[in-house]
């Protein structure tokens, strides 16, 4: 058992942008991610219902776990990406249990 300090990057973005975002993420060095589509929540733009049938109005939640070095490469690119579309990005330090 090995516990590694890592960075968790969480992003909420328009579902229509997910494919382009994943391409950018992988090119920047992320080796994997978890994606939840058609999420609901309430933010500064009001309530977004998860029963949205039109992908253009739906949001997705994606997270990846990476090293500090990879995170330093990815985060500026996420910032540029989110300038072109709506979304939010959160980071946190996590302990990753590698077996």
Image: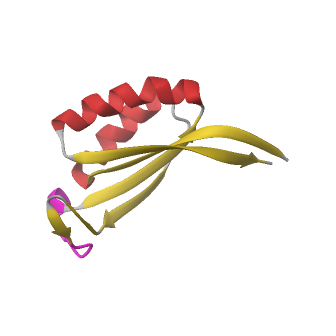
Closer to the camera in the image, 38 or 88? 88
Closer to the camera in the image, 93 or 16? 93
Residue 67 drawn at (x, y percent): 60, 32
Residue 16 drawn at (x, y percent): 22, 51
Residue displayed at 26% across by 28% down: 80
Residue 15 visible (yes or no): yes
Over which residues does the magenta segment extend? 49-57
Residue 28 visible (yes or no): no
Closer to the camera in the image, 65 or 19? 65
Residue displayed at 61% across by 46% down: 94
Residue 76 drawn at (x, y percent): 36, 26
Residue 30 drawn at (x, y percent): 51, 34
Q: Residue furthest bottom?
A: 51
User: In the figure, residue 17 lies in which quadrant?
Assistant: top left
Magenta region, main secondary structure: loop
Residue displayed at 24% across by 37% down: 82
């Amino acid at each position: 058992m090995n516990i590694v300090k890592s960075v968790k990057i969480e992003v909420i973005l328009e579902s229509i942008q997910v494919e382009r975002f994943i391409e950018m993420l992988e090119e920047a060095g992320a080796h994997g991610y978890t994606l939840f589509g058609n999420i609901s929540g309430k933010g500064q733009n009001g309530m977004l219902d998860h029963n949205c049938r039109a992908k253009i109005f739906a949001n997705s939640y994606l997270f990846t776990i990476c090293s500090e070095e990879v995170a330093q490469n990815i985060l500026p690119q996420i910032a540029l990406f989110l300038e072109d579309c709506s979304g939010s990005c959160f980071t946190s330090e996590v302990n990753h249990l590698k077996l």
